[in-house]
Amino acid sequence: MAIARSLALSTAIAALASLSCSKPEPVKAGRPTLTAGGVTWRILNGNWKKQGDSLVGSGGHIQSATELTDGTIEMDIEEQGGAPSTVGVGFRYMLFNDDPSRASGYTLNLSGNAFNVFRGANNYWLSVNPDTKGLIPSSIIDPKKNHVIIRLKGPSFEIDVNGASLINLSDSAYTHGHVNLWVESAGQSVLFSNIQVKG
């Protein structure tokens, strides 16, 4: 069963990767945008607003209007309420037909003091590291506020949190895509500040 699911995911990733390379992702009109950290962000769903040069979001996704291949994504992520919410920073992230429920790419998910990096194809997400399942506790992660740096170079991802190395991975399924910020809970606001996206 696990082997069949893994093969199905690999086939879906290969098909989506070839699709994304053969023609650009369509940009649908009508989505509201915000500008923060020198980046134009398209609100896909949920509630998002600007606070100075920062973004505050709950219950949904916001995505950079432009794609990033290699470069650095850096920001502070701060929970604004009581109980921690699951928060994601997606990279090399793509949507099929501009539909947030049909996403592919990678995402770093943080929840409390735990994390994992997932690879998705058509919204089916598995850990990039096949030896891990779910979220992994880490003493590096603060449940309330974290400074995150994601460095992308070819198939290599280096992720630092709060000045320490969190994880280094290599995966070649996706070569480019958008930056996507996600807050799971509609009842919890998260502040994304000091945003820098450099290609």
Image (tube, rainbow, N blue to C red):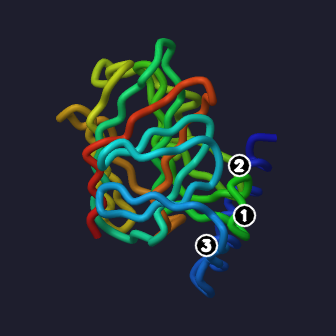
Image quadrant containing the N terminus: top right
Q: Residue at x 63, y 30 (%)?
A: 186
Give the quadrant of residue 72: bottom left
> Please, what is the three-letter code of the amino acid marked with disc 1?
Ala
Q: Is residue 18 above or below residue 52?
A: below
Q: Residues within 10 Å of mark 1 (few under 14, many from 20)?
A: some
User: Which residue is label 1 attached to?
Assistant: 12
User: Which residue is label 2 attached to?
Assistant: 124
> In the image as oriented, which residue stretches furthest toward the left?
163
Give the quadrant of residue 7: bottom right
In the picture, measured across the screen, residue 111 lies left or right of residue 168, that is right
Q: Residues within 10 Å of mark 3 (few under 14, many from 20)?
A: many
> In the image as oriented, which residue stretches furthest toward the top?
82
Q: Earlier in the sequence, mark 3 or mark 1?
A: 1
Which of these two is toward me, 73 or 194?
194
> Looking at the image, do the residues carrying marks 2 and 3 touch, with CB atoms under 8 Å apart?
no
> Please, what is the three-letter code of the amino acid marked with disc 2?
Tyr
User: Which residue is label 3 attached to?
Assistant: 17
Q: Residue at x 49, y 40 (%)?
A: 88
Which of these two is toward me, 46 or 17?
46
Q: Is residue 150 above or below residue 114?
A: below
> Please, what is the three-letter code of the amino acid marked with disc 3?
Ala
Separation of disc 1 and disc 2 at Cα?
A: 10 Å
Q: Earlier in the sequence, mark 1 or mark 2?
A: 1
Q: Nearer the viewer, mark 1 or mark 2?
A: 2
In the picture, measured across the screen, residue 5 lies left or right of residue 115, that is right
Secondary structure, mark 1, is: helix
> Looking at the image, do the residues carrying marks 1 and 2 touch, with CB atoms under 8 Å apart?
yes
Q: Residue at x 62, y 59 (%)?
A: 104
Q: Residues within 10 Å of mark 2 (few under 14, many from 20)?
A: some
Q: Residue at x 62, y 86 (%)?
A: 23
